[in-house]
Amino acid sequence: MGNSKLFTPVTFGPLTLRNRTIRSAAFESMCPGNAPSDMLLDYHRSVAAGGIGMTTVAYAAVTRSGLSFDRQLWMRPEIIPGLRKLTDAIHAEGAAAGIQLGHCGNMSHKSICGCTPVGASGGFNLYSPTFVRGLRADELPEMAHAYGRSVNLAREAGFDAVEIHAGHGYLISQFLSPSTNHRKDEFGGSLQNRMRFMDMVMEEVMKAAGSDMAVLVKMNMRDGFRGGMEMDETMQVAKRLEQSGAHGLVLSGGFVSKAPMYVMRGEMPIRSMTHYMTCWWLKYGVRMAGKWMIPAVPFKEAYFLEDALKFRAELKMPLIYVGGLVSRSKIDEVLDDGFDAVQMARALLNEPGFVNRMRDEENARCNCRHSNYCIARMYSIEMACHQHLGEELPACLKREIERIEAKG
């Protein structure tokens, strides 16, 4: 235990964290009206008080067109005072505050983002369902600029770091992946061309971040489905991000639209997911086709480690491991493998004080049993762990959770 790196400080650019743990930017669904709430503040404060090095507020849209949920943050001047209260609360507990910035691209609907959803290319999004418009080349500089503006707003709100979302099938990822980028102009075709929009965004972000904001980037090591990006290309994306001056990479994988459980692993509890949905046709559609739409991918601890080690071997910059960490022993192993920090989400939803407990117990393991109930409900109401609910769950949901946990 003496030689564990876990509780030693770690530095990303201008920011030093008190230990090597980061709460990953899992969507909390706690921002009605696209603005921070007391519930969001209380949740992040509890994680900060639980010993985390930095907690990351999830995925704030850089423009209104980038919203995919109606309970998601949208970066604009009006919400800065509310975010300031949140970062003050996090800092008071001794943790750093990060915020993930992104744009969902085609994963939206007019009723949420206020316009026809835009993406790297036009087409139809089955999940919303809606037609999608491909962005024109002359709109891209302004879109990249929106990321830079959001970095400046994050600074004003008291955040120490931003995490740019370039993975999971959102806008930057839609430009990078040949499966979603069918453009015929200089932003499509070769990998060099598909990286151009990411380059524009990173130039704006690094300029805005200056010398006092840490910049992390979350990216895919694989898209997780046939026809998506594989490691030969994503390795080049990582090297490009290293050149751009980013202070750290978060190595993830999967596409929310095509391979959602590649990101999260395990099975999606379809009954739980549809139970909270208010739209009747979506409820029944997902209940009937959910198993087919969201195929299960087996959970195993540290499920991205094998791929991530290949990136560790090729890159000099700081790397952050995310994916399936629930025990102190596995976290120590990942840090010993040369990763600079680790990110967790579900473990901390299950036990906000998990980091503090790891300090005291060499064999600490959190009590998350991988039913993914927390994810199932976040599409409709706030993310929560079924082990800590105030209300009693209906019997059919309890049965579903028990069945999935028994498998795990």
Image (spheres, rainbow, N blue to C red):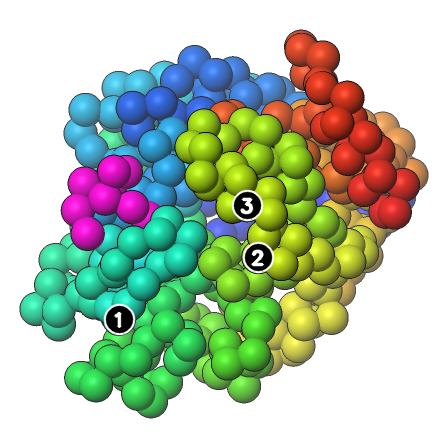
**Viewer-proximal residue, 78 or 124?**
124
Q: Nearer the viewer, residue 389 or 207?
A: 389
Q: Badge 1, how many Cα within 10 Å: few under 14, some, many 20+?
A: many
What is the number of the mark on residue 121? 1
**Residue 4 vertical position relative to residue 253 in the rendered view, above or below:** above
Q: CA distance from mark 3 to mark 1?
A: 26 Å
Disc 3 secondary structure class: helix
- Circles 2 and 3 in contact, beta carbons < 8 Å: yes
* Magenta part of the chain: 108-116
Can you tell which quarter of the image residue 57 is in?
top left
Instruction: Tell me which label, 3 or 1, sits earlier in the chain.
Output: 1
**Residue at 18% of width from left, 40% of height from top?**
114
User: Foreground: 354 or 268?
Assistant: 268
SS of the residue under disc 2: helix
Query: Which numbered disc flags the more N-terminal residue, 2 or 1?
Result: 1
In the picture of the structure, the residue carrying the numbered disc 3 is: 286
